[in-house]
Image (spheres, rainbow, N blue to C red):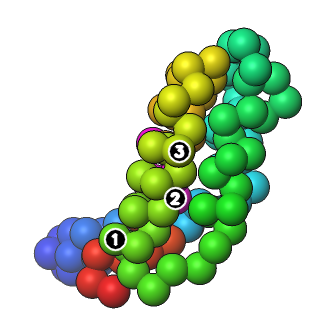
């Protein structure tokens, strides 16, 4: 009986703890939350530029990650929002990994 309880706990508990995929709203909130208003970053600057990336549909995880990287490279020249742009890139990659599996 103890073995059955242990096995059920090991199988059922991790399945119940699975995190749902990140949404575009989650991305925007986490990106904008807690950041200072670095020069030019007020009002979601640095995050809004990633909105088209996380709003698009991709066939594979690598396609989504590439779109995050391209957006980051396009923005990093403007150092006024460097901290937020770096945070947006990390969150964009997290968004991709939570919405597209490696096996796709």
Q: Which residue is mark 2?
A: 95
Quick check: 21 left or right of 7? right
> Local crowd at mark 2 within 10 Å, few (<14), some, or many (≥20)?
many
Give the mark, 3 or 1, whose residue is nearer the N terminus.
1
- Do labels 3 and 2 touch, CB within 8 Å? no
The residues bearing labels 3 and 1 have C-alpha atoms spaced at a distance of: 18 Å
Q: Residue at x 50, y 32 (%)?
A: 76
Element at label 3: helix
Q: Which residue is mark 3?
A: 74
Q: Which residue is mark 1?
A: 62
Instruction: Identify whether 86 is placed above or below 22.
Output: above
Element at label 2: helix
Name the image quarter holding residue 8: bottom left
The residues bearing labels 3 and 2 have C-alpha atoms spaced at a distance of: 19 Å
Q: Is residue 22 magenta?
A: no
Name the image quarter holding residue 20: bottom right
């Amino acid at each position: 009986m103890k073995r059955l309880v242990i096995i059920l706990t090991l199988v059922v508990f991790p399945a119940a703890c699975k995190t749902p995929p990140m949404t575009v709203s989650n991305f925007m909130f986490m990106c904008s939350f807690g950041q200072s208003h670095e020069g030019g970053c007020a009002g979601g600057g640095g995050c809004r530029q990633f909105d088209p990336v996380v709003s698009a549909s991709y066939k594979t995880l690598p396609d989504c990650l590439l779109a995050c990287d391209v957006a980051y490279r396009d923005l990093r020249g403007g150092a006024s929002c460097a901290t937020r742009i770096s945070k947006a890139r990390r969150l964009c990659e997290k968004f991709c990994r939570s919405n597209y599996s490696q096996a796709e």
